Image (tube, coloured by chain):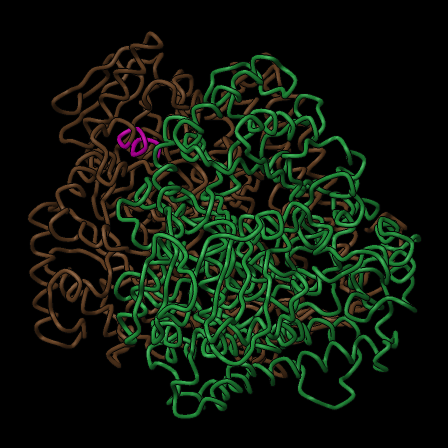
Chain colours: A brown, B green
Amino acid sequence: MPPSGVHPAWLPPEAFRALGSRRVAVHAGGEVAGRVAAEVARACAAFGGSAVCTARTPAGPAGYDLLFRLGGAEEALGEEGFTLLREGGRTVVTAAGERGLLYGLFHVVRLGEAAFGAGPAPETHRPALASRMLDHWDNVAVHPVMGQVERGYAGGSLFWRDGAARGDLTRVRAYGRLLAACGINAIAVNNVNVHDTEARLLTDRIGEVALLADALRPYGITTHLSVTFAAPVLLGGLPTADPLDPAVRAWWAGATERVYAAIPDFGGYVVKADSEGRPGPFAYGRSHAEGANLLADALAPYGGTVHWRAFVYDHRQDWRDRTTDRARAAHDHFVPLDGEFRENAVLQVKHGPMDFQAREPVSPVLGAMPRTRLAVEVQATQEYTGQQHHVCALAPMWSEVLRFRPGGGAGPAVGELARGGLVAVSNAGDDPYWTGHPLAQANLYTAGRLGWQPDADPLALLDEWIELTFTPGRTPDPERLRAGVRAVLRGSWATYEKYTAPLGVGFMVRPGHHYGPAVDGYEYSPWGTYHFADRDGVGVDRSGTGTGYAEQYGAHWAAVYGSPATCPDELLLFFHHVPYGHVLHSGVTVIQHIYDTHFAGVAEAEAAREVWASLAGLVEPALHGRVAERYGEQVRSAREWRDHINSYFFRKSGVPDARGRRIH
Amino acid sequence: MPPSGVHPAWLPPEAFRALGSRRVAVHAGGEVAGRVAAEVARACAAFGGSAVCTARTPAGPAGYDLLFRLGGAEEALGEEGFTLLREGGRTVVTAAGERGLLYGLFHVVRLGEAAFGAGPAPETHRPALASRMLDHWDNVAVHPVMGQVERGYAGGSLFWRDGAARGDLTRVRAYGRLLAACGINAIAVNNVNVHDTEARLLTDRIGEVALLADALRPYGITTHLSVTFAAPVLLGGLPTADPLDPAVRAWWAGATERVYAAIPDFGGYVVKADSEGRPGPFAYGRSHAEGANLLADALAPYGGTVHWRAFVYDHRQDWRDRTTDRARAAHDHFVPLDGEFRENAVLQVKHGPMDFQAREPVSPVLGAMPRTRLAVEVQATQEYTGQQHHVCALAPMWSEVLRFRPGGGAGPAVGELARGGLVAVSNAGDDPYWTGHPLAQANLYTAGRLGWQPDADPLALLDEWIELTFTPGRTPDPERLRAGVRAVLRGSWATYEKYTAPLGVGFMVRPGHHYGPAVDGYEYSPWGTYHFADRDGVGVDRSGTGTGYAEQYGAHWAAVYGSPATCPDELLLFFHHVPYGHVLHSGVTVIQHIYDTHFAGVAEAEAAREVWASLAGLVEPALHGRVAERYGEQVRSAREWRDHINSYFFRKSGVPDARGRRIH
């Protein structure tokens, strides 16, 4: 349970009512299953049920309504799967491993009364992706520019404070419990940009990581650590970090041995190398496969994994040079290495080719490395999507990525191809609501759930979150509450997209902090993020006549994206430079689309604010007030976006709004 | 003398050769005159002359070549003036006050051998402006965003370190000596943005200010303090800072009494009120005259002065509203108050109506408040003029301001109207070269010299600085050295203007730090700094058809600036919005002017770099290297400016360069 004053998120006591009012037996043993027993006991104490913890599974009819038991076929269920069935008027959850039992518990919580009805038919659940991970971009020492949590919008770090691991880990345990309830099973506890202080977590400060691992382990969560590729030099005093140097390999082997001595179930390393100034194998003329395999080999004896980020590009690009295309970079760098990575090396690929924009195509890398374990990286923390001042429920976007089929209609979806799992950059911090904006909790929740089931209906997952968090059934007007929260969440990404950068062109944000509009903010910069708007048109030619990026896709998508005639409207300016008068599939011109969507996006944000205001009596007042306050900022900011972008394009194009609305 | 490792700036030992090789008598008494005697003694020891310190002026022919003596008519010379004449083969400097003697000494240093020639004719020197002040925007506690010196480009503060006044004041004394040699006689030792730590300098930390005052006093420099208008609330625990509240008035009287107990010759207060978020009298419905007079009255019994900044404007302007004009603000706020300020209140007015851009018109306030003591504020620290990475000698710009005649051809110049003196924001810090860029020393030097003589020829002042600093006469090729340094300094402001914002339009800098180009960086911001470029034209209509700012000037300038037909080219876009095809007085169109000047500006910067490189054997190697390194950055940055601005306007206008040069 979270400490006093901290919001219970999607596990309020009320969510346990159905379970807690039953007679429940838990056949439990071990640390993780012990959590199941404890949850059951607490729920039953609260809601009048009874909890029995049995040494072995009761045989025959017995005095319980719900049974959690270990057993069944491990091969079928794996360590994390479970079955749920009704037999003899009882509900039985069976798992082969303790973690399966824990996930089964939270499944029963989600089902509520439905877990005890005539149905459900026997169900078998197991995660589609074995690894469902959060990356925390948390610094141990507060960074002078980036603060304690890089791109964090929810207060300080949950793990670190005053330059060390927190002494009181109550909140970390509460976090682990929430994450287990949405299916997360791995956390990297420090920033991928590993600064000097954080580098030492690998060696003399591993004890602090062990404390965090101890707090997270009962919730089935393994702990991972971001490390610097330069560690052998920085920490080991070696003259090189060359991945093929025997001394370097020996240093990593020794360091890793000591890590596992401290944390026997340690998950592994996360590495950002040769990226935005971080050290990496390029300095030694080695490939990224050689770099990743160095760490994979050190981890292999212990079953650990290295997550190697594919976010490698030239961040000192010359904006004058239109032949260089940052979008091409990951494919150019990594696809030639397919097959060269160890099996315990996961290549962690951002879902789009750029950097977590509100609209990007799916990265072509995800369909192009069949012999490599790929993980899809998404960003729950809303760096480019409103920084938790704006409501922007991202599950629909992530779901589009996971259901995207790189081979076209027939082949497997990204959610099937991502053998390395799903990684979300966490949006949580020590804010009382965990995520700054209370509705941003939905992004954390759905990130976990989509990792478990990538083809899930994202709107159904949002509904799950709404039911758990707001327990509408306990309010005077459940349907109005459900409908209201749904209304403000479901279309929020589309709304955000409407009032920000148009038609997939991306960026247009204020440099550095990335909040608020600056149409030319990155236009003449070294970051490789341009829109090339002039008085005649806008967009980036990434077709065969341009940078050729579209040709990095398989034949189906290369053809679709390669021509303005077939390119989906929402990605048109990502792939093509077109005149303002270009007519979209929607029937309106690009310039009119810009005006229309920007007026509409603000209107939608204003309407959402009103919907939220109307829920005042149905939502806990403090939470309602926090969201209402953030809507004030969202609407203000959305109007700035609308007016900047409309004015910018009106001044450039000279085309008036066909509907005569005011453009400044 | 500066500590070891610190550059001697414009007082290298060599500059004292002519004086030091003579027989010199000093009729000295007191702390300041004691500095004269000490300088003479040191110079004579170095260069073989002899120094005699006499109790009274020797009568009749005696064994000396140069005499410094107190005497003469104080009324004619004032405390700071002096005469210089040749009599009987001797040079005699006579002053009525010790500070006059000190200034006479440095005058003799500047003259070098010429002080002992057949000439000069008898000369009388006294400062045109009684107050020649430096404002240091130094924080005691390092500010998390602004650092130790706000807009400082020369290292840390000369005065403050580790949250307190420096223990070793050797460098402060060396600084005082340099400033005396260019005529500065007042320093405000802390930032006008007074944060919590610095607020306490007024009260319990006044002892630290007293230490600084002690170090500066021997050089004729009085010490001033920036204070917060909210001090009675913040420090005094009063419920209000209302300037008409008797308790507030009593608090300031008491605080000021204690300041003078610690520093009997304390100069006074500097206040930034109701400006960019600082507290001020507006909160109490009081005028700025009432605010300033509150402090003036507290200071009056001790002869102190309050410097009240006129930099008051709405920094949360709506960019959509084209009727509001930040340029109007100082005039709108202050001119109606003319005559209401106490005589010991100085209204400190930035030289232009905006904020230290490379080109602005002269502030109309400077000609519109005859019954107020006005000071002209200039910015030696190069916030908007290259941040001491670019060479930008500002004396020619300041000179234009000081020689500007608000009434037109006949009336007095700004340099005559500024009864409150000249204030320069200092560009010095604890950098070994004092100013980061060694050539930026010239800005500090000429700021002081222009305060002494506002109608001086700025190029002659630059020559003075060159002679003192580089002592070309001691190098193998004096003329080449002189010509080279002149070449890189004299046109440097014009060069900088060419490659940055065109035709007086201003800004176009990167937000926040203000270095480097961002054409739209402030275009849709709340700061009131816009260019309104669209596909047809660019510029701000500040004529009668626009914001009416031009009409704040007297009839002559209102007419000149009010029409594009008469407005000087270099200010055209400050005053008018014109089509790209508008033909300038120079005969070229606005758009072609933009292209031409940006290509030319870079070419000039590149040429200056070559000239500097050619001086390698004639300049001390470390200094030569530092400047050469900065030229590398200047040329890189100038090219960015050129290409951003040319591309921006080419993309917007669609007009190709008439000379066919490459625009990206």
Residue A174 magenta-drawn?
yes
Left or right side of B575 for A162: left
The majority secondary structure of the magenta stretch comes to: helix
B222, B335: nearer the viewer: B222
Q: Please say if B587 is above or below A260.
A: below
Residue B194 appears at what percent x and percent y? 49, 37
Left or right side of B329 for B41: left
Is residue A6 in view from this perspective? yes
Residue A519 appears at what percent x and percent y? 65, 59
B573, A425: nearer the viewer: B573
Q: Quadrant of the N terminus of chain A?
A: top left
Left or right side of B417 for B19: left
Q: Please say if A571 is above or below B250.
A: below
State the residue lying farthest toward the front: B60
Q: Quadrant of residue B472?
A: bottom left
Residue A232 magenta-drawn?
no
Q: Please say if A73 is above or below A289.
A: above
Left or right side of B198 for A384: right
Residue range of the region highlighted in magenta in the rendering:
A172-178
Residue A208 appears at what percent x and percent y? 17, 41
The residue shown at (40%, 62%) is: B434
Is residue A124 in view from this perspective? no
How many labels were placed on the picture?
0
Residue B452 appears at what percent x and percent y? 59, 58
Q: Quadrant of residue A570?
A: bottom right
A532, B243: nearer the viewer: B243
